[in-house]
Image (cartoon, rainbow, N blue to C red):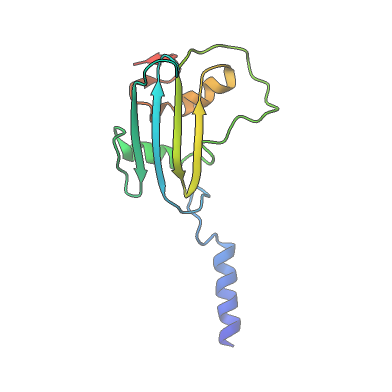
Amino acid sequence: MRVAVLICVLAAAVGCGAGVSSTGATAGPTSLTITFWPQGTTKAAAGTWTLRCAPAEGTLPRPGRACAKLAALPKPFAPTPKDMACAELYGGPQTAVVKGTFRGERVFATLRRRNGCEIARFDKHAFLVPGYRAGTGGEA
């Protein structure tokens, strides 16, 4: 009888998403390094910042806010799908590299502004780049 009850409890826990956060992501550490080049990677980097979540800390300004924004995104560092049609717009030389771990998974994402899709992806992550204002193509 006890085994049957235990099996039912375990099945209910799995069905309810035990071990999964409210955003649908598995729990795991987030520790990122963000480097930004406002004039492209052939010029000097404007800065490098760190971000860790749970607890929120690092050299990135307002790490709690950044961690909350990242938590709200289901797959923030997923690349643009290869078959995506993107507008041929040049948004500027700005480049950012994000590397480390996100929700326990390795991350190495290069964010550029070479076409419409990459501009949108870069702007989605603008909160990780101090001084950069999304939608303007430049620094604040």
Above-or-below relation of 26 to 37? below
Q: Position of residue 121 (x, y in %)?
A: 52, 26
What's the residue at 42%, 26% (across, down)?
Answer: 126
Residue 112 falls left or right of residue 131: right
Q: Position of residue 135 (x, y in %)?
A: 45, 17
Q: Quadrant of the C terminus?
A: top left
Q: Position of residue 65 (x, y in %)?
A: 34, 37
What's the residue at 39%, 19% (across, down)?
Answer: 133
Residue furthest right as drawn: 83
Above-or-below relation of 12 to 74? below
Residue furthest front as drawn: 42
Give the image quarter of residue 8: bottom right
Give the image quarter of residue 42: top left
Q: How many marks?
A: 0
Residue 66 falls left or right of residue 6: left
* Residue nearest the observer in this picture, 26 or 107: 107
Q: Position of residue 125 (x, y in %)?
A: 45, 29
